[in-house]
Amino acid sequence: MTADEQQMVEHIVELIRKPGVTINENTPLVSSGLIDSMELVDLLLRLEDITHRRIPAGKVQPKDMDTVAKMFATAERVGKPR
Amino acid sequence: MFRFSNLVEALDAAPAERPFITFWIDEDQRETVTFGEFRQRTFSEAEELRQHGLKTGDRVVIIMPQSISAMVTFAAAMRTGAVPAFLAYPNFKVESAKYRWGLAGVTANLSAKAIVIDAEFPDEFLGCISLGDPSKLIRAQDHAKSPQSHGQFKNAEIRSENLAFIQHSAGTTGLQKGVALSHGAVLRQIEYLSQSLRIDGSSDRIYSWLPLYHDMGLIACFMLPIVCHVPLVMQSPLEWVMHPDSTLQIISEYKCTLAWMPNFAFQFIPRRTPNGRWAEYDLSSLRLLINCSEPVRTTSMSEFQKAFSVSSAVLQSSYAMAENVFAVTQSDNERGPATLWADGVQFRNAHRIVPVCKATAGAVAFMSSGRLLPNQKVRIISESGTTFDSDFVGEIVIQSDCLFDGYYNRPDLTEQAIVDGWYHTGDLGFYHDGELYVVGRKKDLLIIGGENIYPQDIEEIVGGHASVHDGRVIAMGLYNPNLGTEEIVVVAELVDEEELANSVALEGEIRGAVVSGLGVAVKKIFLKPPKWIVKSTAGKAARAATREKLLREHPELNAHADLDQENTSK
């Protein structure tokens, strides 16, 4: 796991407040119901901060945000440096 | 009175040089078209749609991201005489399985001749689009880059009574219903609304982040600008939800004068904008900011007003629905919506409004949705269909000359909704001093010992507890055969799962708060971990689905629920 991914994992653990749930860069988040749509907004904003890229929300689908690893791949694919 | 017999004529009469749509893509990118440029693009695209075989009355489904291109396609389809319908574009906020189910059902019902999607429409959803014979899937072209001449294109002959488009009514459960609207009905609605709001195309400018597949976005922020030739500054709802402070930035920068928003946005914007930046924005250009599409809450309005120092006369309210094209009522432009304080006991027990002063113990506040627009009739009726006088709470039924023709391809639903020429809204409200007040939904009402309890009131109190996630509370009534009445059951999500260990103490505090606020006792409280409550696509707690989930998890409640169902169906 990269340092950026680690930072995002820590943020998600803080966000979901589920004691006992372990998360790594490949843990399904959307499809497992661990995070909801408003939290996805929060995660996209955090992803923009960590990657220093602007991510057009309209180009992101639920599957693109399902794991931390996919989030960073999405930022790379559709994000623009800012 | 407008001189137009259809919406295409209205568009064609707009001043060519006047700016029409400024699309705010993000802080660095905007796209602008004048009415003339927009018109030119609709001619090119209409020509192409006609080449695909589209003719008068054919349905065209448009599934494109919110953009000028999507709006061009919609207007171009109307130019050919076809009947367009916007459907939501897939996005990260909507769960994929739910989107697939909705897309399959709605496209099957419309049996469209053409379905227009953009170049990037995700392949994974293509299989869910119902394509009948001879319907076509069309990938939209970018006509902005290659405008063509429209010398040969001749508009279809469109009469006022012809269908203009289909807009889908919002629903948290079940398939969305397609509301079929004629050109005449839409033009009449816009005429009444523009008179009431004193719209002036040469000086007004509308701001919108609202989705075009919803009546507030489609009618107030696309059709009204077309008919009244008003410039529009808009953005995508997704961009807005990520950066809600952009509302303030856009209104300040473009000096917008008019906007519509649902109630929750009046709280969401100030809460998502750092307090230190509130004073940076200048909203003094706003004439009217209209709270619409959800019950209007005085607390939400005052939160927005205090944050951004907006004059109270700017904040307005309206009662609207897709089935009536849009608005039924509009608050007074000069003084804003009236607030009424009423006796809480009389309201709950006798369904009556007895005005009291604000300081009276147990007083409840209501915010008016304003007076009727021209040619709108409203009745407040009892369960048995008797019409009530002012100050009694009952179901709101409406009649008007902009009422819909029916749900598209669903005579069964139309027959249930329109009875003897009156559309039964399912909303509860009352009339006071010539103004309409909307208090909730009929089917949500709890009847406890003959006393009407509005679940929203209980939910607001429970949601106010520091350990409960505000907005993630559902109150419901379950019939107790031993008592012959319903009992109140509340299910609430805790902010922190660890607090479940303190359930007993928390339940006690919550019960106490409800009793002191409303004078009614909650029979059972179920405290649940975060994410337990079922939500709608709009992110709100979904009442029916949450109730079903609770009954599944707590089968001991089922005997009561069955009787409850039987009781209410009689």
Image (cartoon, coloured by chain):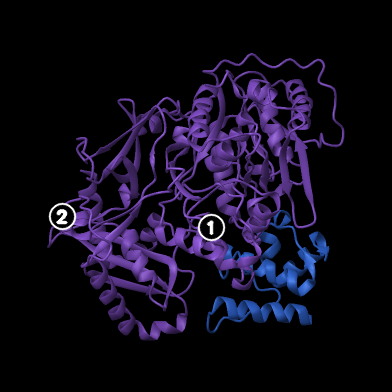
Chain colours: A blue, B purple
Q: CA distance from mark 1 to mark 2?
A: 42 Å
* Amino acid type of the residue that numbered disc 2 sits on in the rendered structure: Gly
Residue for badge 2: B450
In the visual, does B507 lie left or right of B285?
Answer: left
User: Where is B184 relative to B532, above or below?
Assistant: above
Q: Chain of mark 2?
A: B
The residue tagged with tag 1: helix, strand or loop? loop
Q: Is residue B399 visible?
A: yes
Front in this rendered view, residue B150 or B108: B150
Can residue A67 be seen here? The reply is no
Q: Which mark is residue B310?
A: 1
- Mark 1 packing: few (<14 Cα in 10 Å), some, or many (20+)? some
Residue B360 is drawn in which quadrant? bottom left
Residue type at mark 1 is Val
Chain bearing tag 1 is B
In the image, residue B525 sits, relative to residue B230, either above or below, namely below
Residue at 35% across, 82% down: B503
| Image coordinates for residue B217, horizontal then vertical, percent | 58, 42
| In the foreground, B547 or B87 | B87
Image coordinates of residue A78 in percent, x first then y, are 80, 59
Question: Residue B148 got which mark?
Answer: none
Q: Quadrant of residue A74?
A: bottom right
